[in-house]
Amino acid sequence: MEALILTVLLTSVPLIFAATGELVAERSGVLNLGVEGMMLMGAVSAFAATSIFGNPYMGILAGALAGAMTAAVFSLFALGLATNQVATGLALTIFGSGLSGLVGAPYVGGTVDGLPNLAIPILVDVPIIGNLLFNHDIMAYLSIGVLMLVAWFLNRTRAGLVLRAVGNSHDSAHALGYRVLLVRFGAVSFGGLMAGLGGAYLPLMLTPHWSEGMTAGRGWIALALVVFASWIPSRILIGALLFGGITIMQLAGQARGWTVPSQMLSMLPYIATIIVLVLIARNRDFALANSPACLGRLFISNK
Amino acid sequence: MSKSSNSSCSKLGPLLEAVGITKSFGDFVANDDVSFSIHAGEIHALLGENGAGKSTFVKIAYGLLQPDTGQLFWNGKPVFINGPQHARKLGIGMVFQHFSLFDALTVAENIQLAMPPGETMASLSSRISSISKEYGIGVDPDARIYNLSVGQQQRVEIIRCLLQDPKLLIMDEPTSVLTPQETEQLFSVLRRFADNGLAVLFISHKLDEIRALTSRATVLRRGQNVGSVAIKGQTNSKLAEMMIGNKVKNVARQKAPAKSKLLFEVKNLYRPQESAFSVTLRNISIAANAGEIFGIAGIAGNGQGELMSALIGEWRGSDSGVMFLDGVDVSLKNPAERRVARMGFIPEERNGHAAVPSMSLAENALLTSHSIVELVRHGVLDLSGMKAKAGEIAKDFDVRLPEANPLASSLSGGNLQKFVVGREIIKVPKVLIVSQPTWGVDVGAAVFIRRAMLDLAAEGSAIVMISQDLEEIFAISHRIAVLHDGILSDAEPAGNLTAKKVGLLMGGSHAVGGKSV
């Protein structure tokens, strides 16, 4: 049982990273559907860097950088040239899948040492929960830390307020003299960085090898997760555990020969997301207060 | 103007001076060699029709646009204002015509965004309360903008400016959403400003207001400065003449037509409250005769939106026997069915309600005609018919088109409004329901639209007009009722009512023929 819970926790880590990053991008008004592509770039770069340097921490760094750079490609088109965000995001996913396959070809079949666990002294000895919560690798801790930091940033800092303002009405923000595109570039880059970290977690921790398309739709689940969380950071944690749990249930179910088809289980995150969307739509106040009104809309400065 | 400000005028040069400002957008010259100056302690009006270049000019002064040629001087020194933040740093504040507020954020957050960084939310909140108390403009710092009325949102804009302690305050049509009382309050705030030696650049279409408030006016016409005049001794028609370059045809108070047929009747309309921020409509009764404009006055947020959507049929109750068109019960009919029964509707919001900004005029012409099976044959659009119809509307209603079949969004406010008004009137509806027909349009367009409505009434249609512009209500209504807190007063012939009486009713006194429930 403990092993199962641990697996769920680990499965949710990449989702937390990718969804937190995408949440920041979306709160600034940018819908980047390229999460899957950015995660794949993060995954392959992390694996390659770890193989080359023999150090998984170099892998983390490489994954984050690769994600941010992939996001910069998106920014160049969707922000710089004001292309349609949906189309650009989809293209980014296809681009990321292809390029990661190419870059990763020499590494298929290889294996690396994963991240070591860093037990937190004293806390790890707490009965029952100690080993579950306080005996993880650095990225697991980092995911929670980043999530809390983002929640604090969005709601308690001026920069976070500006970011929300840009996502709510880019014209008003522009009229006040805020650099809409710069804010969005920052948010999208952060989103890419996080997606890269989420991708890096796969070869570094979950399955210590590289294979083409190894994210297996986690980028899409992360996108759904942002909506499921209704753009509120704290709910990402709940959603990631839930969605991670469903993923594990799928595998565990297959192993135990459950009669429920695994496809039914893989549908669950998306069904849950649709239900949340319906609930949000029914609550006007909530929808107005938290969903970024400018999401996906192009901003072209008239200067 | 106070003594102190007079002395500061003579001692110092202008606070802001613009010399030879020219700004073009493509072939269109929005500002053509405009020179202008404003002194500390002066309330200065910037007059001009829509499209005359006022907005472009103030955007340049606020750093949102940079001039192609020309130079700005601030306190006598040449400046290049490279952005609004720079303008605010110099001491230039601006209240926009279209609010630049963030719906999803609170009042305090909105204000914080406009302030230089560094101040804590707590200190800001207390400054907001003290300023709003000082000037009698109350808003809750923690309220979210989407829950505020248009008038309240404007107060947020004004407070946001006041907090920045500006030396020059630019106000772009600030009174268009205010009640007469609120306007008077605003004016006393602005006069206090001027007494303290601050300059106010006041943009308005309302000539009475300009004469009541300002000391000097600069008039722009087609991008050019056609003169700066002292307001003293100017009449409305003289100012209007400068603005539009030809005589404004004044509209006299209307006399009720001879006893005529009852065309539109609303009996005891009740609409329950839908959210904490909507108004309950109670006992609304309207009887509009053929040939008559039935004016509904009232301050924003007293149920105008709710009444309008009920009259259009966007909202329908479950009872029949509430609304009659020429004797036929239309209470349960949807807007398309009501249009088939020859009702016409012109909602307040041009962009997105009356017209679809991203569609061409031809397509917009179709949108209110499709249910009448005009311009559609066996489900297929008659494109050339649509274009011809749009052209006909444009021609008959003086809609100036930048190209043959432009997007609705490419028209200026006044032109688009003439189009949506014309689109309904050209069909000669039995009953026309219209809300704020001249909101935010230039004087020339407003006169034209009012004239067109009077002509329609003269042809035997009945018009129900909801408007917050008292001048407009008095200018063209035959009978007038006042909406307050969801209750409509009894209608009185326009000749029997004074502005003061209506003002009282608008403020909630039901002494004059009102129905207190």
Image (cartoon, coloured by chain):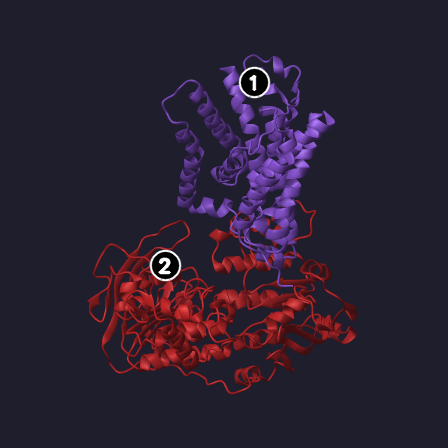
Chain B: its colour in the image is red
Tell me which residue sits at (44%, 38%) in the image: A273
Around disc 1, counting alpha carbons within 10 Å, would you say few (fewer than 14), some (14 to 19), or many (20 or more)? some
Which percent across, then down, holds residue B229? 64, 82
Q: Position of residue A45 (x, y in %)?
A: 66, 34
Cα separation between marks 1 and 2: 57 Å
From the viewer's perspective, is residue B387 above or below residue A262? below
Q: Colour of chain A?
A: purple
Asked if one can make out residue A57 in the rendered structure from this viewpoint, the answer is no
Q: Quadrant of the C terminus of chain A?
A: bottom right
Identified by mark 2, the residue type is: Glu
Q: Chain of mark 2?
A: B
Say which of B439 and B191 sits in front: B439
Badge 2 element: helix
Task: Identify the residue position indicated by label 1 in the image.
Answer: A132
Element type at mark 1:
helix
The residue that mark 2 highlights is: B306
- Residue for point 63% across, 27% down: A139
Q: Is residue B493 above or below residue A100?
A: below
Given the image, on which type of amino acid does mark 1 rest? Leu
B346 or A43, which lies in front? A43
Circle 1 or circle 2, nearest the eye: 1
Of residues B280 and B190, the one drawn nearer to the viewer in this rendering: B280
**Tag 1, which chain?**
A
Q: Position of residue A155 (x, y in %)?
A: 59, 41
Please state if B410 lies on the left or on the right of B428 as rendered: right
Does any portion of residue B486 appear in the rendered image?
yes
Give above or below for B491 relative to A277: below
On the image, the x and y values in percent for residue A141 come to 62, 26
Q: Is residue A219 above or below residue B241?
A: above
The label shown at residue B63 is: none
